[in-house]
Image (tube, rainbow, N blue to C red):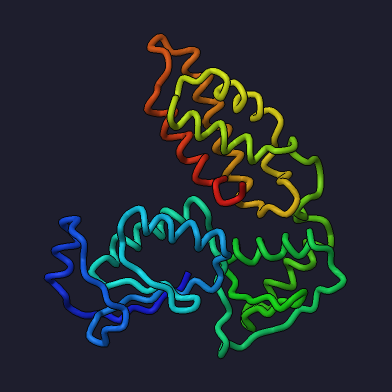
Amino acid sequence: MAFVNNKGEDEQQSERADSGQPIDFDPNDPDEVKVHYDLEAWNFDQRAELSEALAAAELPHTWDGDELVIPEAIEATVDALFERFDEELGPFPIVLADDEPFTTFNLDEWSLADRNTLSDSLIEAEIPHRWKDTTVLVAADAEHAVDELLDAIEAGELLATGDGVEPPDGALGTMFVTADKLAKDPVDHESRTRLHDLAEQIDAAHPPYGLAPRVWKSAVAGVQAISDQVVADAESPKGVDESAMIGLAQSLRAVVRPYV
């Protein structure tokens, strides 16, 4: 995520924002101090999730192409929201700037699974890049690192998305539905049992075809955490820890929601 910040002083607006009161925001006002977030790398679902979160929190904003524009007064609040999204949906790709030197790799003979693996590896390594169909443009100073990634994928040292054992059909849907139920009713026996059983049927190393490995890893970790909580509740003399289960269920629901 990249953003450009036009700093300035607007103490009155900031005080209203801190107090939770609505603030005036006219994006067309040349005197309005605004903060711009470049979200070119975000997909449609991620942007929709962000817009929904901003609307739910009653945070004024507008879109200018790929940029999210907000008043400076709520910058700290929006920054915190982005940090939450980075944990739940990220990491996000670093987009190669138009004027940045680059090296081109033509991968039209690669499978989609291998290109997905490379894309995820570039994101994890925080290498600026940009895709044009099956060709990837990477920052020139990262050429050697990308060569090593390509060699590792071709040698089978990095897992290609969709290779190996697939999880049960509808696993993501099961995660979302049961997590949603547990977030509302943490003692729901059927949902607790379904996720506890699912934890034994899924593997972080084998995501559903087309799903980013990092997202699947987060989802599997969320299911495992709930499974562990089910066991802990069964062994605890105090019984179900409803607060802990609600928190775990809400986290899992947030991870899988954009993909179901």
Name the one closer to the observer, 191 or 125: 191
Relative to 61, is 89 above or below? above
Res 102 → quadrant: bottom right
Relative to 98, is 48 above or below? above
Percent from the top left, x then y, of residue 107? 81, 73
Residue drawn 56% across the image and 70% down it: 41
Relative to 100, is 213 above or below? above
Relative to 73, is 186 above or below? above
Residue drawn 78% across the image and 59% down it: 113
Name the one closer to the observer, 43 or 76: 43
Residue drawn 53% across the image and 32% down it: 225
Q: Is residue 190 left or right of residue 112?
A: left
Q: In this view, does 56 lie to the left or right of 93?
A: left
Name the one closer to the observer, 98 or 53: 53
Res 111 → quadrant: bottom right
Percent from the top left, x then y, of residue 74? 27, 65
Percent from the top left, x then y, of residue 174? 63, 34
Badge count = 0
